[in-house]
Amino acid sequence: MLHTKAMSYLFGDSTPSSLSSNFIELLRDTLSFGVDALLAEDRLRGREAEAAAARSAADGELLRLAELRSNVARAVDGSPRGNDASATSRCAAVLRGALEEAVAAHEAEVAADLAAAIAGLERAMADERAGCVRAFEALVLRHDLPGTSHGLRLVAGDPGYAVRVESVTSYGLRWRSEVRLPDGHALGHVLRVEKLLASVEIQAPETGGWLRKETRLKAQRLDRLFVTSATVSPQQVTLSLRAGADGAGAGFALSVERGAAVRVRRVAEDGVAVDVELVEGDAQRLVELAEKVRALVADVVAHRSALLEVTFDDEPLAEMNRPSLLVDRLVAAMAPTVKEIAARSLSPTELVLKRTVAGNRREELFVAKAELLAKLEPLSPAARQHFAALPLGSTPSLLPAPPASAPSSAPASTPAPRRPSARPSLTLPLEESGPTLVLEGRGTDGRAPVAEASGVLPGDGDAVSGELPEAEDDRDTQAFA
């Protein structure tokens, strides 16, 4: 696999892991993609239902028009009309013609309305699918998905190489990305072989002679040839070397496969290629050249800038109405790692990783499980089940409301009486020269205190008293205790 710059990660308990990137950030972004995809699928199902309803309504309208045609025609045909030259017969003929014309026009209107409705729904569905592709693009331009292998394709241009990254997973995903090279990158110009490795030559047959043509082995220097195209995968490097930077002229085609023989073909100016049998020692030099190319492109994957195409199980994602299948595969691919991170995190409510920053310094990365679960809140309970394999726990806001419990027939138990206590009171003057309000708390049968109010009204001096309305909770009355 072609990697960006690798970093060492530890689990939360400081034990080593095989992770080379921030898996917690990958998990966050994968959940975001999954939610977007599932919400889009829900809307796609709604559009499909609308389309089915529109087709059903149109079919019903056409049936009613056909029935109307039949009923009117039967009425016209069954009416007495006299001979064929009579005014009634002529009128009947006009009516039949008008009937057919009117029904045909309205059938065409129904068909046109249906076509317009379906076209609008299909545009809306295409927009939803395009949204899924954009969400996937945002995910894979930032992260390497679990089990992903990358391959590169370089083609010489002006002034440098056009670079494409081809990515594939073991669970059915395949996509191509465009690369935008940073200024000053070595691939910004078409390279000669000597820029990668000096003094590269092989023994290859060459035909020559003035009087008698003969073929013999001759050293062929590759230094001055241009690398006009290359493919780099985890197992193989192929190179096209030509005399011209634009791919013109004679040259060689090389294939260096790990654990297999190096293959070389000599390519003439007219494109005719013949195999070259390498002599001892030449193959190792070509292996070194291939490794130089592999090292040169090691950082290219980090510069992916746009998604060109993506397929899932050989179906374009832009044409899929059920992206939940992709979400399920991603969750299944990530679940084992998430479970291991959870098991090795010292806090049961968090997922924790550590990474070495410099020397003996480590940085802790963590995310609360509640934060991850909150990402799923826009989904229905059924849709959240697509993430059930991830050990994120559950929160009350994500659980369906419990069923209302039936009233119990058993008599309620009587609470133990409390020890009587002194009744606290609070005296408040309502106005500077007005009445006084006395608030007292009293206990009743061991229950929460109830506030009483008493006071003297101005003018007639009558005393009043009574209970205050029952508090919403105990805090209102406990304030006086």
Image (tube, rainbow, N blue to C red):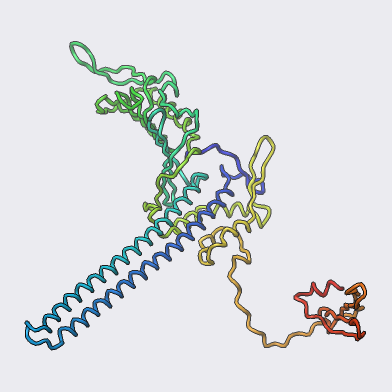
The image shows residue 79 at horizontal and vertical percentages of 15, 87
Which residue is rendered at x = 44% and y = 19% of the image?
198
Q: Quadrant of residue 55?
A: bottom left
**Quarter holding the C terminus?**
bottom right
Query: Taking 96 as reference, is 211 above or below it?
Result: above
Q: Can residue 429 be seen in this view?
A: yes
Which residue is rendered at x = 28% and y = 20% of the image?
205
Query: Taking 79 as reference, is 266 above or below it?
Result: above
Which residue is rendered at x = 50% and y = 56% of the image?
34
Is 86 left or right of 3, judged from the image as shown? left
Q: Can residue 276 be seen in this view?
A: no
The image shows residue 310 at horizontal and vertical percentages of 41, 48
The image shows residue 418 at horizontal and vertical percentages of 86, 80
Q: Between 220 and 375, which is closer to the camera in this rendering?
A: 375
Q: Between 114 and 99, which is closer to the camera in this rendering?
A: 99
Which residue is rendered at x = 63% and y = 42% of the image?
355
Q: Quadrant of residue 153?
A: top left
Furthest residue in direction top, as rendered? 211
